[in-house]
Amino acid sequence: MPELPEVETVARTLRPHVEGCAITGATLLRDSSLHPLSLRPEDLRGCVITGVSRRGKLLLLELDAAKAARADLRGATGLRLALHLRMTGRLMTYAAHTAPGPHTRCVFDLTDAQGQERRLFFDDVRAFGLMLAGTPQTMQLWSFWRELGPEPLELTDAAFSARLDSKNSAIKAVLLDQKVIAGVGNIYADESLFAAGIDPRRKAASLSAAQRSRLLRCLKDVLELSISQCGSSIRDYRDANGNVGAFQNSFAVYGRNGQACKACGRALEKIKVAGRATVYCPHCQK
DNA sequence: ACGCGTGCCTGTTGGC
DNA sequence: TGCCAACAGGCACGCG
């Protein structure tokens, strides 16, 4: 399931395939995969993909609208296509005219600077993923975007600590709250809490300054290590070249219920925290 | 205003 | 062996 490291890896691997490409056509194959605020994919015809970036778990295609087919979009600045892959979303390019698959939600026809044609598919088995194309003004109407918290890799101890102060819920629920920090999902929440030795049920505001600092450092370390290994592939995740990540081989707790703790050797336990499956070590995490 | 539970969606897994 | 409930889980939404 794509979280920050996986989306970062998709951005890095997709970039060489789509940067500089013009969108010559687009077809939406499932209405619910498009946010109601979004422009229609076909409205993006004539736009050029100038960059691929990431914000939290969102993948962003930056667009130059100078030659947009839609007259009222022509010259718009800051036009972007945001994609949330949720659990099973994938972005991959294929040869021109490749037929969409059973789970293809949107097709973009691209032409690069050399005139080479290809197709970009947004595939999503479970159809939880979402696309939103729009100007910065439109993006601001999207509450998820507007309220998205800071990037964890750029967060200071002081800013992180301040965001926990008012939180009376479990620290794990707080880590998963995209308004508090952007990009953390179930895997990296469990892994960072284990690394920091903190019980996932602890109330966020009850953590000491030292624990908060340690948790942020562990979170950054886990995210950076995962990015360096091209993310984690549990089942569905692939980068833009169809390759799996390797970080799943380094999990200390996620998916290891009943197995031996790598630190103390006792059995890891599985509980529910904030309605989500959580694996932790009762001995090492206090 | 905040925290919690539920629904969305489909393929895979595990128990009987 | 076959069937079906449970599960995976990010986020919107409704409730108290």
Image: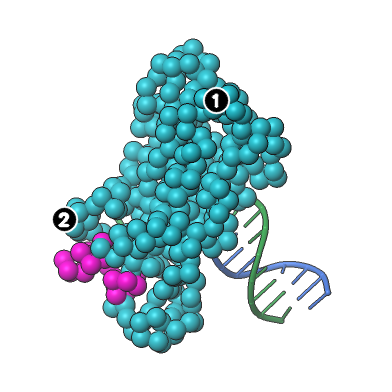
Chain colours: A cyan, B green, C blue
Q: Look at label 1 and name its amino acid.
A: Gln
Q: Is residue A3 above or below residue A122?
A: below
Q: Residues within 10 Å of mark 2 (few under 14, many from 20)?
A: few
The residue drawn where x is 54% and y is 63% is A234
Q: Which mark is residue A114?
A: 1
Q: Give me the chain letter of mark 2.
A: A
Residue A187 seen anywhere in this rendered image of the structure: yes
The image position of residue A187, as x and y in percent, is 43, 63
Which of the 4 quarters of the picture holds residue A96? top right
Q: Look at label 2 and name its amino acid.
A: Ala
The image position of residue A122, as x and y in percent, is 58, 41
The prevailing secondary structure element of the residues shown in magenta is helix
Q: How many marks?
A: 2
Q: Nearer the viewer, residue A176 or A236?
A: A236
Callout 2: SS: helix
The image position of residue A118, as x and y in percent, is 61, 33
Which of the 4 quarters of the picture holds residue A92? top right
Q: Give me the chain letter of mark 1.
A: A
Residue pointed to by mark 2: A158
Front of the two marks 1 and 2? 1
Q: Is residue A122 magenta?
A: no
